[in-house]
Image: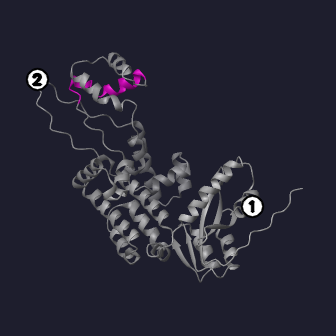
Amino acid sequence: MVRALPEPEVGEVEVLGVDDFAFRKGRHYGTVLIDMATHRPLHLYDGREGEDLAAWLRDHPEVKVISRDRSSGYAEGARIGAPQAEQVSDRYHLWANLGQAVEKTVNGHRSRLAEPPAEPADIPDEPQVVQPQTELKIVTRLREQHAAAHDLWQQGMSKAAIGRKIGLHQATVRKLVNAPSADDVIAKSLQRAHIVDPYAGYLHRRWNEGVRNAAQLYREIQEQGYPGGELAVQRHLRRYRTGRGHAPDPGPKPPSVREVTSWIMTHPEHLRDEDASKLRRLRERDPDLDRLTGHVRKFAVMMTARHGDRLEDWITEVERDPFAPLARFARNLRRDFDAVRNGLSLPHSSGAVEGNINRLKMLKRQMFGRAGLDPLRKRVLLAR
């Protein structure tokens, strides 16, 4: 018979930290409550519903501040269970959500990320460059699906009905309907690196030297470590066969969406000189990305210097620009305005919560992931 362990004593708690953690596979979550003064875990419960948080808070009316993520469930539970407490939206989650919005915005501008090609040298007695590459079939299909979904949505059909009509899963229809343009949907498909890409420069140089045999070129790059098959090389070169023209110089590979997002989200003083130079040239070429970078840096100053009083002006300024993902982020801030403003003004953060969640994950691994929530809860709460 297993001896029942006593519940840990909970003293006066003025500042409470709340966050969720993944408990089992299949997106099953639990919630942990932390005393932000002592950094000690106070309570664990199954799920992340606001009712359980509200019930715990009713027993602890001394709580004055609740630091949490932007979950609407936690916001409602805190409001009901501790109306006297100030809610503080954690800065880490705010910055992470901003990064997601920035990445989606950069995705919509990915066609502008490449450096403009250099002026080609005159090549006497050579035909013009081959016709541009035909659009990928998957891209064409996504454009058609996006147009069809938006047309049916404007006719008043539900997303489930649209899915049945055009033969798509409802989640796919949701993505199509929520995307302002087809480019937002196909961004990830177009951003994927092709297996031939690292060898494109060599292939183009050999093609312009007159070597047009795909099998020979395949063997040459295979000796350089190319891991793919000959068919991929044939497909890559197919675009240059019509007209027997010169293959264009591919130039430097454009930065990925994630690279550009990282440059924008990094403090200018912490950027490598090379990356700072690339971002500067990108901002000079694209006024939209220049404004996007400006918005991010204003938010960073507001967050690090505790200027929560500037939040309303920042949201209004962002909503005037045509950046749909960033505008959605701003509108969500407005829905949780008081907590976000507190998060940008007060010194509280969820650092202690994140540290405890990392420790909790370690304990889960030590228990081989087989223990239920109750044994895990006892081990977390009673550990010294």
Report the residue that reaches farthest toward the bottom.
84
Q: Quadrant of residue 218?
A: top left
Marks 1 and 2, how far apart at CA: 81 Å
Q: Is residue 46 above or below residue 263?
A: below
Residue 242 located within the stretch drawn in magenta: yes
Amino acid type assigned to the residue bearing label 1 in the image: Lys
* Label 1 sits on residue: 378
The dot on residue 125 is 2
The kind of secondary structure element at disc 2 is loop
Residue 232 located within the stretch drawn in magenta: yes
Camera-nearest label, 1 or 2 = 1
Q: Is residue 78 above or below residue 383?
A: below
Amino acid type assigned to the residue bearing label 2 in the image: Asp
Q: Is residue 364 above or below residue 32?
A: above
Give the magenta part as a residue range. Answer: 229-247
Q: Is residue 135 left or right of residue 366?
A: left
Q: Which quadrant, please, contains the C terminus?
A: bottom right
